[in-house]
Image (cartoon, rainbow, N blue to C red):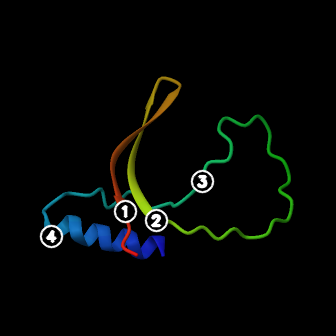
């Protein structure tokens, strides 16, 4: 579903002549740990199903060693 949403977003941006870096690959993810020292074996887990009622466009930037997130836009999804 996220890839479908991403394709719809790219289409909407293209109709408004907004340039998108086509080389950047869409990677939906959740960061569980940053700068981990060692990898550990992951236990078997039950898949999690999340329902979303809104989406957000967030810009991440790195300055030195600090990673910052800035909320650019947020919208509620139709129900």
- Residue, disc 3: 30
Left or right: 63, with 19 as reference point: right
- Residue, disc 4: 15
Where is residue 11 drawn, in percent x and y? 25, 72
**Residue drawn at (34%, 59%) of the image:** 75
Camera-side residue of 20 and 29 = 29
N-term-proximal mark, 3 vs 1: 3
Q: Give the structural element (helix, strand or loop) at label 2.
A: loop
CB under 8 Å between discs 3 and 4: no
N-term-proximal mark, 4 vs 2: 4
Does any portion of residue 29 appear in the rendered image?
yes
Q: Give the structural element (helix, strand or loop) at label 4.
A: helix
Where is residue 23 drawn, in percent x and y? 36, 59
Rate crowding at label 1 as few (under 14), some (14 to 19) or many (20 or more) other CA atoms within 10 Å: few
| Marks 1/4: CA–CA distance | 22 Å
Where is residue 21 drawn, in percent x and y? 30, 56
């Amino acid at each position: 579903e996220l890839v479908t949403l991403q394709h719809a977003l790219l289409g909407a941006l293209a109709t408004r002549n907004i340039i998108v870096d086509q080389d950047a690959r869409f990677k939906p993810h959740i960061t569980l740990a940053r700068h981990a020292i060692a990898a550990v074996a992951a236990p078997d887990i039950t898949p999690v199903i999340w329902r979303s009622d809104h989406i957000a466009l967030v810009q991440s930037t790195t300055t030195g060693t600090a990673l910052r997130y800035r909320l650019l836009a947020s919208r509620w999804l139709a129900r």
